[in-house]
Image (tube, grey):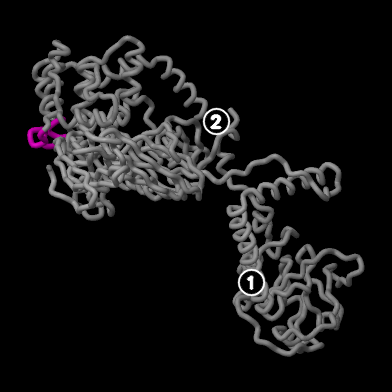
Amino acid sequence: MDPSKFETFGKYVLLEKLAMGGMAEVYLSRSIGHGGVGKFVAIKRILPQFSEQPEFVDMFKDEASIAINLQHSNIVTINEFGMEKNQFFIAMDFVNGRNLKQILTKAKQANRALEIEHIVYICKEVAAGLDHAHRCLNPATAKPLNIIHRDMSPHNVMLSFDGEIKVVDFGIAKAETQIESTRAGTLKGKFGYMSPEQADAQEVDQRTDVFSLGIILWELLANDRLFVGKNEIEILRKIKECNIQPLRKLNANIPPELEKIVSKALAKDRNLRYRNAEDFHRDLHRFLNLKYPDFSKGDFAKFLKDLFSKEIEETHRKLLDYAKTDFSALMRPKKTPYQGAADKIAPYGNMDSTPNSIASTQKSITAHPNNPGAKLEKQLKRRPAPRPKKEAAPANAPSAEEAPPTTSPFEVREGVKENIIEAKNPNETRGDSGLKIDQPQKRGANPYGAAGNYNTAYSATGSPGGTPPGTYAGTRSRLENSSYHRKSSNTAGVVAILMVAGVFLGGGIWYFTNPDKANVLVGKLIAGQAEQASTGTAKTAPEPLPIEIGPKKVMVPITSTPPGAEILINGRSSGELTPATLSLADGEEIALTLRLQGYLKYDEQVRIQAGRIVTAALRADRKAYLDIAVMGTGEISIDGRVVAQSGPANGVVIPADQDVTIRVFDPLTKATDEVRVRVAENTTRRITLIPRANIRGPGPAGR
């Protein structure tokens, strides 16, 4: 197995993708420690298109901040939360198994079914995990976190092949410690597993999780879905009505005691349900011990291992191969050309001739306490006082023997380190040590140079080599590391960066405002470079390549209250229903339309941009009806909209409980009449209009 084929993600190696969700993906991974020691974990990381969208990032952070406090055998443990490669991630325990939905699908394919004791055991363990989450305390304040999962479904119940049951995905869990509460009217969770109060967008508590777990228990026992419908609206309506079919009518083998437990968990009135998951767990545990006293976790594990025998063998083989593979080479940081130079330093020792940073040079100088140059360490940090340049060395100039031995490509002059590395020139003057000595230049005196600056050169072996008398006087490096030059370089660097940024910004603005011209220009540039690379000559008038550079795509979440509305973009159906996330062109202005039966059509002009979330509140299409009679002839209109060329007009639909104006107009005689009315929902009102030559104001309703 070639380790280089795998992606590294921080201290983890991503081995294979396990699952893909709406906002994140999960990988089987292996953490690599010292000496290649590590363990298998599951890495859940947010998808790149959602990394810059605050709502999704906040939801991901909420999951981590909530679940990291949960430590229970029936909850998947969160080990780490962080960011790598600009993507937030969660590292959690790897569960070698399948979720409950996959278990049911596999059992159906194998024409096998879960036994009653298996079903009760699963739900009992889930209830224990939920009870721990509900009672979990904030370690900082010792106060209850009041965590509610709110998304209990078979997808979020993991079963290991060893028979362990674990709750996963607290991504939409609600804790009272969250800074921002859920927006009013927003539904979260899978529709078929919501509680009546959750479907009605009311405040939820831990009894909501009890109801959702009750749905799972009912469906496992009945081997059927509880709340189903043609669309989400119909499902939500059935949940609100909460008409639960008795289990014993579907399966006579279900004990009455168990049916009673299920009915209590699924009570429409939450005050009649189990008060908490602990009470639910206690009744399931008691039932399992009384009815199936010999049952053990090993019995359920045997069932799973028989059902997934081939998959378990394949997974075991892959995990064994991954464990044997040495991924440690992937985790080693790549050495830079200068790394490791310090390791080559002997006392006064050799150093690679490659240039090093000042910090490395200072380290080499002070590496040994007996180094006679250590006393200059403090002087290196001080800026020399300005002095006029002298042509002769001062009387107290130290000799070569007193100078600090180093092989650094910097010279030391009165506490200032200056780089003297330059390209070799066969005509240049060098001292006895073989290092280049710059000749005095005809230029102005350096105001920052110290009086009597001198050069002390060192041979490549580190032995001090002096320069002929007088040759050091007035010598200067061409690249001086003085504060004057540093300030000038910093200023020039800032100016250069600002100029480059201005060019890119101006070019970007021009590109988006002139996309056609930009495409042609880019085509010409690419064509010219291609010909120049092949012939070695630049093309004077290249033909534009047929390329299309489209605008950047961004992911835009679109939600509505209530959900399930058809999404139309510029009058065309997108094929998606709310909530959905669409890939749209950044900066484009679109006409967004949402249509849902029983609600008024929603229209909005939307400017697409990264991080934007479109939320629409749909108004119910409440209707009333009019029967309009006309004494004579004339065109009938309601609020300016023509509904009939001549009367009468019966069953005309109007918005309920809203003022509307009904008008009749005879184009031949110019006679008109109008009246303003308001009709209650689902009621019909009859009115009579009499067109007259003189226009009169609104008359009384109901004539």
**Numbered tag placed on residue 490 in the rendering:** 1
| Dot 1 alpha-carbon crowd within 10 angstroms: few under 14, some 14 to 19, many 20 or more | few
Q: Are marks 1 and 2 in contact (CB under 8 Å)?
A: no
The magenta stretch spans which residues? 269-281
670 relative position to 683: left or right: right
- Spatial CA span between label 1 and label 2: 48 Å
666 relative position to 79: left or right: left
Name which residue lies at 82% across and 64% down.
Answer: 423
The kind of secondary structure element at disc 2 is loop
- Provide the residue designation for mark 2: 325
Name which residue lies at 60% across and 35% down.
Answer: 4
> Which quadrant is the C terminus positioned in?
top left
Main SS class of the magenta portion in the image: helix
Q: Residue 179: x, y in percent?
A: 28, 54
- Magenta stretch: includes residue 278: yes
Residue 579 in view (yes/no): yes
* Quarter of the view holding residue 446: bottom right
Decide which of tag 1 and tag 2 comes sooner along the chain: 2
- Type of amino acid under label 2: Thr
- Type of amino acid under label 1: Asn
Q: Residue 694: x, y in percent?
A: 23, 52
> Which quadrant is the N terminus positioned in?
top right
* Quarter of the view holding residue 128: top left
**Numbered tag placed on residue 394 in the rendering:** none
Relative to 229, is 518 above or below?
A: below
Residue 372 in view (yes/no): no
Relative to 376, is 75 above or below?
A: above
Q: Compare residues 399 and 184 and report the one nearer the observer.
A: 184
- Magenta stretch: includes residue 686: no
372 relative position to 681: left or right: right
| Dot 2 alpha-carbon crowd within 10 angstroms: few under 14, some 14 to 19, many 20 or more | few
Name which residue lies at 83% across and 75% down.
Answer: 438
